[in-house]
Amino acid sequence: MGWAALLAAILIACALTPWVQWVRALAALRLPSRIERRPGPSRLQATVQACLQPYEAELSSLGFVHSHATQFHSTPRELAPWQPVQVWRHRQVPVIAELMAPVSAATPELVQLTMYAEVEEGLMVASLKLPLWTVPPSPRWCKPAGDLFASVKAQYEAQLALMQDEGLPDFLPWEGPETIEARLSRYEQRQLEALIEAGWLVSEGETLAIAIRRLPLLAAQGMRRSVRLRSALKRQAGASTPSARAARLEQCLALFVAGRAGAAVAQVPLALQWGLYLASWLPILLPCALLAGPRFALLLMLGVAVQEAGRWACLQRLGFRHIEVLPLPLIGGVRLPEHTRSTTRQQALLALAGTLPGLLAGVLVWALAPPAGSLELAGATLLLLNAACLLPFQPLDGAALVEALWPARRLQLRAVFEVLAVLAGLGAWGAAGWSLAGLPLAALWGLRALGWRPLWRQLRFEQQHRAVSAGLERRDGLALARQGFQLLERLLPARASMSQRLRMMDTLVSHLRRKSMPRRQVAAFAVLYGLLLLGALALAPGGWRSMSRAFADDPASAAADAAARAEARLQDMDSAALARALDPRLEASGAAELALSSLAQRTGRPLPAEVRAFYLARDGLDSGPELVLLPASEVQPLRDNKPRLPGRLVAGLRERSPGAPLRIVGECRRADEKPCEYRVEAVVSWLQVGEVHGRPVLLHPRPEGEDWRLVSLDTEVGFLAEEQGLRELLQRRWRERRSVPASASD
């Protein structure tokens, strides 16, 4: 585990961003509790008619005729879709087709086409051009025939094939407009009731909301639908002709106006928002806990909590009651809802409230705390976290403060400040010795660099828009929007999606609405921000050095910490666990009770607990030439296991000491500290338990009532070395295999 793991965790947390956004969007989604459809007059705009015309031509070629236009009446009324609907009926087959203009800015190039056919028992067979089902339809009332078809003909063929499988004569014919709308209204209402009964939807007054426990599953399905929609957009992209560009301009205007006039998004429950926010931090906190211990992970979470508490208190003090929590790590937290109007002064105060308390507290604690302690780590964590948030690039508080100070020229200044911030950050990192503690910040710079190209494109767009719209009134929003979309046709390539154009226009309008603060307030905030940023960057190298000491950043300290953790783990393992770790073969099994009883009889005493636990886990161990432990049934006198060894021992002793008594010297516990001597005949009669580095391990016969004593026999020099015990042998082999120095246990 290293800093690469923390960097990977940050990338994983960022990769989860789309899923978190889907969960949040679904939690804010509200559906009408009742839908009623009625035939109504056709009020198609020229743009909408241009979108529908190719589909209408295909429907006519397949035998469909136009029936009527439809109006939706829902409860509550504001949840009714704004798009007009055209209904077409087939001349011969009991199928109707429903055409609807683009549903939202997310899919502006795709027209919604739905085909319906109803079986006598009430089951509806439906096919969709777009996968718009947020929740799966009830199988009792709907049977899908597919979605995302390449053409109207392909959709009709899939619809007809499923109808033939269901029995084409059993389908009810579609009659007049009133009958069609009544049957579709009943179908819509039955679907809503079935979804409530199945637990997908819950009632909230006059609206329906997605059940919280269903949100993760539906979010994953929504992400898959989004990928499929993007693929469909690429397939549908065609040549850009002058007439097509003109039609797209009008379509952009219609979608832009309709989107800004839509109903406000419902408030997501705060408990769910906080839950998602805390859950999004887990991929980062877990590697931090493994890297630097749980203490640092708790301190990091404490620093984030201080920031969020500061923002929350500021918004409450400013009088805002509807507060949102963006559930994303590093870039999320407490904020105002998007539709909430706020002044630039309030935005500046909110940016400072998130970083100023934690920065001051961190500097104070870090300066007064004793070195190499928990307080120093706490202060350094608060200092570095809030210093990073002061950097003036998105999505940090420093960029929000720059936006509030200079809204008119915000993009030019943001580009300058971001470059300066990166250079200053690199300088501070270099002054700290390129400590690995700066890797998370470097990752944040890298992620932000991906947004510099869209930032530059937006900058050029807004500069040219100010030049070409100088003569227009600021209140004439439609004229400004038309001018903006015409300009985008020249600036953006033809392959640029309509959703990108709508997003850039929405950003422009939000920037035009910003009003600058008085010059005195701008100067005061600018001086305060400059002092805070310069002070934080000046103290950052010292904080990095403190963090590096706490993280054991140098190789020697890191190796010592790893050895200490490995040794602590080793001390917690018994002989059975050590045996499983050293010899993890699945076919290995423990010794039988009969074999253990026989071994105890041969030794003349009960087996020690660690020996018994070892043999119950593994009947012997083969960990290479460094350590071999014999099965219980093979623990026999040394002469029986190695019959030629006694002769070699005698020959070696005579060669080394001619005329001396044939005795083997060994370690023993005597008061005079003199070595013990044993006859060769006695030593070769001792029980052999195994081998250590090729030397036989023998069971030394001890007086009755004493524990086992293990010795290893060096056959080359005829010497018996004391071995501490079976568990110690296993621990030594465990250290050797993992290259953990034995001195780590001292």
Image (spheres, grey):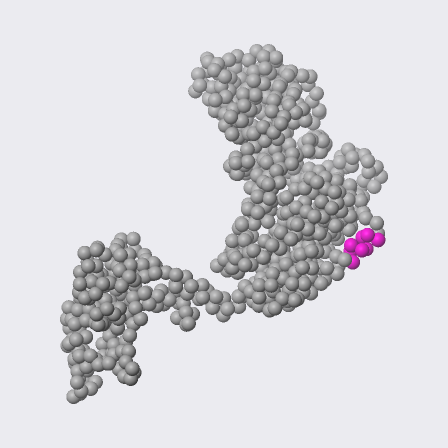
Q: Is residue 525 magenta?
A: yes
Residue 741's spot in the image, x, y percent?
Answer: 41, 70
- Answer yes or no: is residue 725 visible: yes
Q: Is residue 64 magenta?
A: no
- Name the outermost residue toward the bottom: 659
Name the residue: 32% across, 61% down. 575
Q: Nearer the viewer, residue 656 or 708?
A: 708
Name the residue: 59% across, 53% down. 301
- Answer yes or no: is residue 435 visible: no
Residue 527's spot in the image, x, y percent?
Answer: 78, 58
Left or right placement of residue 226 versus residue 658 in this view = right
Residue 582's spot in the image, x, y percent?
Answer: 33, 61
Q: Quadrant of residue 659?
A: bottom left
Residue 652's spot in the image, x, y percent?
Answer: 19, 81
- Main SS, magenta region, reads helix
Left or right placement of residue 675 versus residue 306 in this view = left
Residue range (magenta): 520-527
Q: Nearer the viewer, residue 598 or 420?
A: 598
- Name the outermost residue toward the top: 175
Where is the C terminus found, in terms of image quarters?
Answer: bottom left
In this picture, is 479 found above or below 608? Answer: above
In this picture, is 520 found above or below 146? Answer: below
* Number of marks: 0
Name the residue: 66% across, 66% down. 367
Name the residue: 21% across, 72% down. 703
Q: Quadrant of residue 526?
A: bottom right
